[in-house]
Amino acid sequence: MRFLRPRRLLIAVLVLAVGIPVTLLLARDRSADAAPLQAQVRRGDFRVTVTTSGELRAPKYVQIQLPPNATQAQVFQGLKILSIVPEGTIVQEGEKVAEIDRSPYATKQTEVMLTLQKAEAQYEQAMLDSTLNLGKAREDMKTMEIALEEKRIAKEQAVYEAPSVKRQAELEYEKAERALAQAKVDYKTKTEQAQAKMREVGADRDRQRNLLKNIQDVMSAMTINAPAAGMVIYVKEWNGRKKTVNSTVSPWEPTVATLPDLSVMESITYVNEIDVRKLRVGQPVTVTLDADPSRKLVGTVKQVANVGEQRPNSDAKVFEVLVNIEKPDTSLRPGMTTGNEVETQALRDVLFIPLDALVVEDGIPIVFRQDGNRVVKQEVATGAMNDDEVVIVKGLEEGQTVLLSPPLNRAELELIRLPGSANMSPSGSTGDTAQRMTVPPAGTKSPAPGGSPPPARKN
């Protein structure tokens, strides 16, 4: 028994020695977990940017198209692309680029050849009819001339006859003379009718001949050659897909591919209606490439659309923005995905905090400031903001600590108003009201531009 007591005492001491540090460590961990995230008010330069993703394109290019007389061949259905060189191929002027299916034109050619044969037969028939009718009319006039001569002789012989016989001879002569005159007028009319008929059937024959020639010319031009030297870039259809083998072209959409001028490049992007009001022509843009994220290009806003549009698979309206790439080189290719960061505002020597630290209560922008061991609910006046931070005009000082999420007892804290704003309504408080009223709740992000490409990566 005497031996057991000291041993029990030793065990108790060891348990206490191990248990107390473990308990302190667990308590420290729990307190660390319970401590809210914090950030300090910083001073420095502040940039407001709009970031979007886009796609490179060449605004100047030469189109590779169906022959210009394809519409005159009267084939209105789509033509299938049988073969086309791979996109990005460098071709010289006159080299083969694509082969187009000729079968619709072959069918049309057979149809036109049959119509042409019919038109030529009708032309020959009209010519024979005209020859026959006019020949008969001329023969009738010869007969009338002979009859008129006979009537003239009978009239001269009736001079010594009775007055009635003499008068009858004169009437017969006048009748024959008028018949011959009418026959000559009829002959002229028949001649004009024959000529009009020949022009009609001749025009139809010539039209079919020209159509057949156009079809044959178009068929021979269904091997599409490059009109100039350059890099072949496929064109996109209405659904955004690129035209390639088995795609269709038509005389109304004759472009098969393009040869872009790589010395002039631009990025086309789409900006949501919230951010588009910040953009102006001439603003500087930092352009990055998904293919080489470490590389940065310099650009400027070239054009901002005045009217929004709805992109496929989106319910939001976006505005097209063109960014001109300064000093492009031959490594840039149309279709490359770009990240565009447009600097819309630059401020010098201002105070700013993370956007997550700003909360709006009843239209009043507030922050939860750490003041020693207690938390203070402080009204602030805000200025410009970007995707991550917001400028503080009044209410905070450099180096102060703010919470990135509201404390659990936020409802119990008394609001400290800015001087001069305690008796004002939220709409009349100081600071950037427009910015303040559009601040999202803490912990949330600004809505992504509907229908626009995802934002570019931050550098």
Image (cartoon, rainbow, N blue to C red):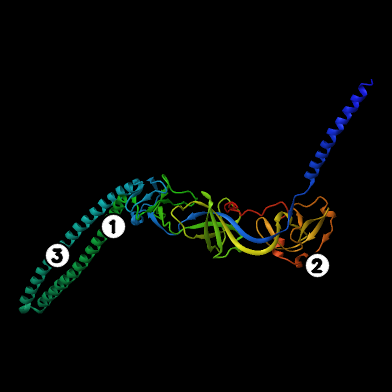
Res 453 label: none
The earlier-in-sequence mark between 3 and 2 is: 3
Circle 1 SS class: helix
Q: Is residue 327 above or below residue 114?
A: below
State yes or no: discs 1 and 2 in contact (Cβ < 8 Å). no
Circle 2 SS class: loop
Q: Residues within 10 Å of mark 2 (few under 14, many from 20)?
A: few
Residue 64 location, x and y as percent?
38, 54
| Residue receiving disc 1 | 207
How far apart, in angstroms, are the residues tagged by discs 1 and 3?
A: 33 Å
The N terminus is located in which quarter? Answer: top right
How far apart, in angstroms, are the residues tagged by discs 1 and 2?
A: 90 Å
Residue 391 location, x and y as percent?
70, 61
Residue visible at 14% across and 71% down in the picture: 176
Mark 3 or 2: in front is: 2
How far apart, in angstroms, are the residues tagged by discs 3 and 2?
A: 119 Å
| Residue receiving disc 2 | 419
